[in-house]
């Protein structure tokens, strides 16, 4: 669906109030509904009502952040990016609603210890075990509890947004937290004499 | 605490991408529309957008949203 409206006229009409604003909002609502339909059509729990709610949420955000649109893309692309984020915020909330952070962290690795690669010779097995132990040691005693919890939850596949919700924080702050954790882990491994090549050799996939 | 082999592999990938300075999710989101249009046009990624590429490789939430944005735009084109 193409919308014949320039970036400037979107911004102008949406900020105008009155009939021009109503028309632009109606156009944008229809456009966003169509744009979201295709990528979300196979997602479980997504129906017409869900898309309507996500679109409504996005329209409110678009209106309140018009001054942040810098014109570096088509206005509609920018609006879809906001709508996609709104849709995922709601979807993630629903999908993870029954899962606590404690459960995710406690079950981070599953029940079993890391299986040492059986194709390795005995010497390499010992080296791999030593590296993994060092990694656990840094995670357990070198990271703050918040950093460790967020990193383990992230490694367990919990969205940052949901980790943030459970830690009384937000996604942006959780990203910074796990970024700090990664930086610390990397530095501490290097200080212990391990390079990323060693880590790659041990479990680089 | 233990990690599975797959999680250790993920952690290795994350560590190998880790830079001292990285964009946050909010910064990524602000540039995502421009980045998506550049990617869809098949243009090479200009220097000011390369940090977005790195963030997308390190952030599951933003990556999922970016992939979805591309799908939405692709259906918009046709
Ligand atoms: Zn992100």
Image (cartoon, rainbow, N blue to C red):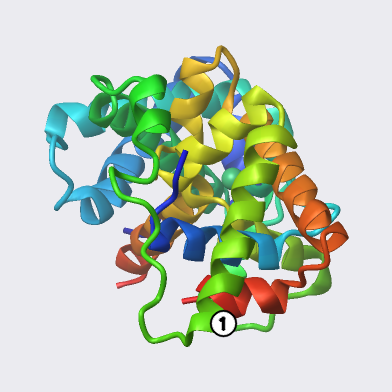
Give residue A86's quadrant in the image.
Answer: top left
Q: Which image quadrant shows ligand 1?
A: top right
A93 versus B77 height, above or below: above
Q: Nearer the viewer, residue A62 or A101?
A: A101
Say whether residue A55 is visible.
Answer: no
At 46% from the left edge and 76% from the top edge, which residue is drawn? A205
Q: Is residue A191 left or right of residue A28?
A: right
**In terms of secondary structure, where does tag 1 sit?**
helix
Residue at mark 1: A123
Question: Counting other residues with Cα less than 10 Å from the Cα at mark 1, is it few (<14), some (14-19), or many (20 or more)?
Answer: few
Number of disc labels: 1
Q: Is residue A53 left or right of residue A85?
A: left
Disc 1 chain ID = A
Q: Nearer the viewer, residue A60 or A131?
A: A131
At 43% from the left edge and 27% from the top edge, which residue is drawn? A162
Q: Is residue A120 left or right of residue A13?
A: left
Query: Which quadrant: the N terminus of chain A?
Result: bottom left
């Amino acid at each position: 669906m193409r919308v014949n409206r320039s970036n400037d006229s979107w911004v102008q009409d949406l900020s105008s109030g009155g009939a021009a604003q109503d028309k632009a909002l109606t156009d944008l609502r229809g456009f966003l509904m169509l744009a979201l339909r295709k990528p979300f059509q196979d997602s479980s729990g997504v129906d017409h009502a869900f898309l309507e709610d996500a679109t409504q949420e996005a329209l409110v955000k678009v209106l309140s952040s018009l001054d942040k649109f810098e014109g570096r893309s088509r206005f509609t692309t920018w609006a879809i990016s906001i709508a996609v984020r709104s849709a995922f915020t709601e979807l993630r909330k629903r999908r993870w609603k029954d899962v606590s952070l404690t459960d995710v962290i406690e079950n981070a690795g599953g029940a079993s210890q890391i299986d040492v690669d059986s194709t390795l010779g005995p010497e390499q097995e010992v080296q791999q075990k030593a590296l993994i132990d060092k990694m656990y040691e840094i995670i357990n005693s070198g990271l703050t509890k918040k950093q460790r919890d967020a990193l383990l939850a992230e490694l367990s596949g919990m969205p940052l947004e949901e980790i943030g919700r459970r830690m009384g924080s937000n996604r942006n702050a959780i990203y910074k937290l796990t970024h700090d954790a990664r930086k610390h882990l990397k530095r501490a491994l290097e200080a212990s004499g391990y390079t990323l090549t060693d880590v790659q050799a041990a479990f680089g996939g | 605490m233990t990690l599975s082999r797959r999680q250790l592999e993920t952690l290795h990938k994350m560590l190998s991408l880790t830079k001292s300075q990285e964009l946050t999710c909010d910064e990524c989101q602000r540039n995502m529309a421009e980045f998506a249009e550049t990617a869809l046009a098949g243009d090479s990624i200009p220097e000011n957008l390369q940090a977005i590429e790195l963030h997308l490789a390190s952030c599951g939430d933003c990556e999922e949203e970016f992939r979805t944005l591309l799908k939405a735009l692709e259906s918009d084109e046709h």
